[in-house]
Amino acid sequence: MKYMSEFRDGGLAKKVVSVIERESKKNLRIMEFCGGHTITLLKYGIPDLLPPSIEMVSGPGCPVCVTSKGEIDTAIELSKRNDVILASFGDMIRVPGTEKSLLQAKAEGADIRILYSPDDAVKMAKENREKKIVFFAVGFETTAPVTAASIKLAENLGVENYFVLSAHKTTPGILGALLADEVKLDAFVCPGHVTAITGTAIYAPLTDAGKRCVVSGFEPLDILTSILMLVRQVNKNIAKTEIEYSRVATKSGNLHAQKLMKEIFEPIDALWRGIGVVKGSGLKPSTAYSRFDACEQFSLKIPKDDKETKGCICDQILRGKSKPTDCKLFKTACSPDEPVGACMVSEEGTCSVYFRFGGMQKGEMVGAK
Amino acid sequence: MAQNKIVTLAHGGGGTASAELTEKVFMPALSNPILESLSDGALFDPPKNGRLAFSTDSFVIDPIFFPGGDIGSLAVHGTVNDIAVCGGIPKYLSAGFVIEEGFLIDDLERIASSMGEAAKKCGVAVVTGDTKVVPRGKVDRLFINTSGIGFVPEGVNISPENVKEGDAVIISGSIGDHGMAVLTKRKGLEFDTEILSDSQPLNALIEKILKADPGIKMMRDPTRGGLAATLCEIAKSSGNGITINETELPINENVRSVCEILGLDPLHVANEGKLVAFVLPKNAGMVLEAMKSHPAGKDSAIIGTVGGPEAGRVEMKTSFIGNRIIEPLVGDQLPRIC
């Protein structure tokens, strides 16, 4: 695959690793915020390639994982109504709420459909006028503009039976929460696709607090290069936001998407599974678009008090305080087939990634050093 | 059957309409002397020596017509391949149809004739069958079950227990084609690609393999769950580790690209016309040559060896630097959202 395989070049990666080894002098604790980065890191065995001075810590960047049980329970309640077809992304379907997942609700008879784009839900609403189509919207700034666009589309087409149950979360709020934590983090590998929408301004609070930021792509060479850029910032004793993923992300981001999000949504306090309520970190359709808001139209209130299973340390893992291997439930009571905690429920969840790719021990790497 | 364009409940009632369906749709497509006897069961002679292989599979694919095949040919290939990878020479098939009321007779004719052509190509006969029609909404269009009987020649013993450290692992061609061909035609995900299913019979290829190496240790066709599932199963049941090389894996460029877009791993995507063989290292070159000489195996490649990780585990030497654990698929294969 042209423009893809180049970023997976093992020979080049070895060279970058040796430069990192040579230049890395101080201990550096780096959080990769995005679940996509966690996958790349573990799939390609990158932590084992790095010198001992560099420690990678996973963050709360899997939108499916941080969707609260209350949000899932609300979606399940809606799906049980005879006049409702509930649509969502495939990743969301298997995630357990308090009692069950959408997949189980579907097996029990609820009309639940998997979609690849909310525009398809609008199309479905046009084709099923007698039903109310509710799109269960999850994701960060990467998917929120698409949901916003679907609301705009429904408005333009005069579709009146399309509603959004928004579980969207936004990045700035959670970055603030991480910053307020007592966890020691020196630097961030920042999410490339979120930044492609938001631009780099959202990282200002981090750099102001002396944390180094590099916006990274999702191929192994992207991440290694980003780590090298962070090492160099440390060596120069500066803290700023740089973009490694320059083929996609820009400083200003996608202005059109930003404008659309601002028009359609307004911020709300959101409950992050495993973390708690984070002020202003959620999105719901604004007053002008409240007729598309499922909560408003079906008089629903999403509960804001999730309780995790005893023994589960997802709250620690999502904040970078612990690793999946520190958890007693990991690979015993908790697995991708039967997830207990938030980080095991989605393919991009830290525990799930560790479960699937993370069994390698140091020294097992072939030609690593 | 011009006056009767759709299947009705009467076609499953056992009366005149049922007989008409058999006579005008199934018999012309599938006819052979045993089927023509229209008995309640098929009678045939057992092999003079060796053993019998018996297998069954149900086909519920959506969409029923897909690039590179349809549910009819797939139902033949699926069972033929299951028998063939056991070392059996497939001989006889049964076919059971569960049809949703309202199904187009034209489509049924198309599927029956595709089954007939596939059976002919495989050298098997559909010797017994059954048709049921159920009310609208009780099945999704058409489900087919096929079962098959094959003769296993004396001396052929295919079993995971034979697999030992050092054995070569050979795949008969590119992986992931069937799953991606079907997925890209699913409603709501109409991709503009020309990925064709690899649905094809493997029995002729396997005859070549058995000729080259009658002592072949193990074969399996990596269908649902893809190559990853098959390798993990064999690693577990044989009590060995397996190591494969990413750079040796044959994967078509368009399959690789769509997998990349959807966040899928080609190792987890279904195949319907591929086999993975475990061979003594000294026979590997010979078996590979034999496989490459047949059209169904022209892209065969040695992709790894038995050994490396602990028993029951599969690892892949990546094209990047390190090794990666290969795990069987969890749940259904679903694309990522961000």
Image (tube, rainbow, N blue to C red):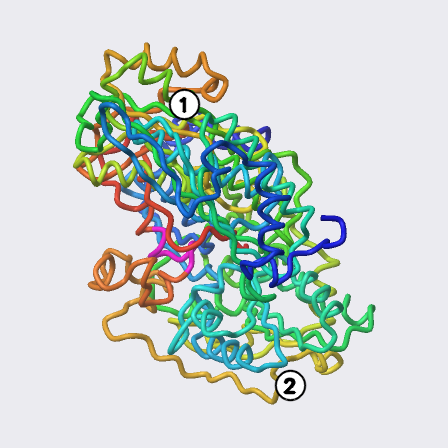
Foreground mark, 2 or 1?
Answer: 1
Q: Is residue A100 visible?
A: yes
User: At which x and y percent is residue B46?
Assistant: 29, 30
Asked if A230 appears above or below B173 in the picture, the reply is below
Nearest the viewer among B286 and B11 is B11
The magenta segment: A346-353
Secondary structure of the residue carrying tag 1 is helix
User: At which x and y percent is residue A192?
Assistant: 55, 49
Secondary structure of the residue carrying tag 2 is helix
Q: Is residue A3 left or right of residue A347?
A: right
Residue B128 in magenta?
no
The residue indicated by pointer 1 is: B248
The residue indicated by pointer 2 is: A296
User: At which x and y percent is residue A343?
Assistant: 37, 62
Q: Is residue A278 left or right of residue B228?
A: right
Residue A349 in magenta?
yes
Asked if B258 appears above or below A353 in the picture, the reply is above
Quarter of the image holding residue A100? Answer: bottom left
Residue at the bottom extreme of this rendering: A299
Asked if A120 appears above or below B335 in the picture, the reply is below
Q: Amino acid at mark 1?
A: Glu
Q: Amino acid at mark 2?
A: Glu
Crowd rating for badge 2 (residues with CA inside 10 Å; few <14, some 14–19, many 20+): some
Q: Quadrant of the C terminus of chain B?
A: bottom right
Quarter of the image holding residue B29? Answer: top right
Nearest the viewer among B322 and B310 is B310
Nearest the viewer among A12 and A208 is A12
